[in-house]
Amino acid sequence: MDQEISIRWSDLQMYSSSNCKAVVRNIPVSEAEFRILIQRFSEKIKWLKFYSNNKQGIIKKDKLSKCFLQLDPSVINEFINEMNSTFFDAKGEKFTLEAELASFQSVPIATASQNTEFFTSPQFLQFKELYESGNLEQGTFKSEENLPPKKSSLVEMVKSELEEERKKKENKIKKKGNKWNKKNKNWKNKK
């Protein structure tokens, strides 16, 4: 009565509900036309990458385009079934797409855009106000947050060491010059 069911790990991942990546191959149309074909699923598409063979407007029949998608898990089966049907392009030619799950396709990590924070920051608003009023001269705008600390023991120590080294070099050059002049005083007098 007890039957042993063997499931391969690859099958488990392929048919799991968390797998929501698909690939569509043999696409003879441009990306714009393909997006029209999948517009019904546009709200459910999380990520899309279209690889076109179309170079300089010429579509080669032996190398067709492909598209990788990440969809909402609730529509993945419906999407694959619909994409495996027959379509017509703008010229009226009939073509069939090949769609399947792409369980191991990598998807880029979503990153939040930071551009919105920049335009609302107080430093930018202060700069914009000065710029629009015409009171901004080149190199005059400095935010207090961007300036280095006025006095720091480390900075002062480094500055003093550099100053001492500079003075030692100057003294060394002066001494060498005096010695050379002393040695050659007789030479000057002989002329």
Image: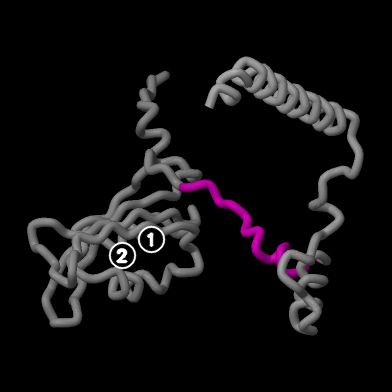
Corner quadrant of residue 29: bottom left
Q: Which residue is mark 1?
A: 78
Query: Residue at position x 69%, y 66% from top?
Result: 116
Q: Residues within 10 Å of mark 1 (few under 14, many from 20)?
A: few
Drawn side of residue 109 relative to residue 51, left or right: right
When the figure is inspected, residue 40 is found, relative to residue 133, above or below; the finding is: above
Q: Which of these two is toward me, 15 or 46?
A: 46
**Applied colour scheme:** one colour
Up/down of 14 relative to 45, above or below: above
Decide: marks 2, 1 in contact (CB < 8 A)? yes
Main secondary-structure element of the magenta-colored stretch: loop
- Residue drawn at point x = 90 percent, y = 30 percent: 153
- Give the percent coordinates (x, y) of residue 173: 67, 24
Residue extending furthest toward the left: 62
Q: Which residue is mark 2?
A: 82
Amino acid type of the residue that numbered disc 2 sits on in the rendered structure: Glu
User: What kind of element bears circle 1?
Assistant: helix
Q: Nearer the viewer, residue 120 or 104?
A: 120
Magenta-tinted stretch: 108-121
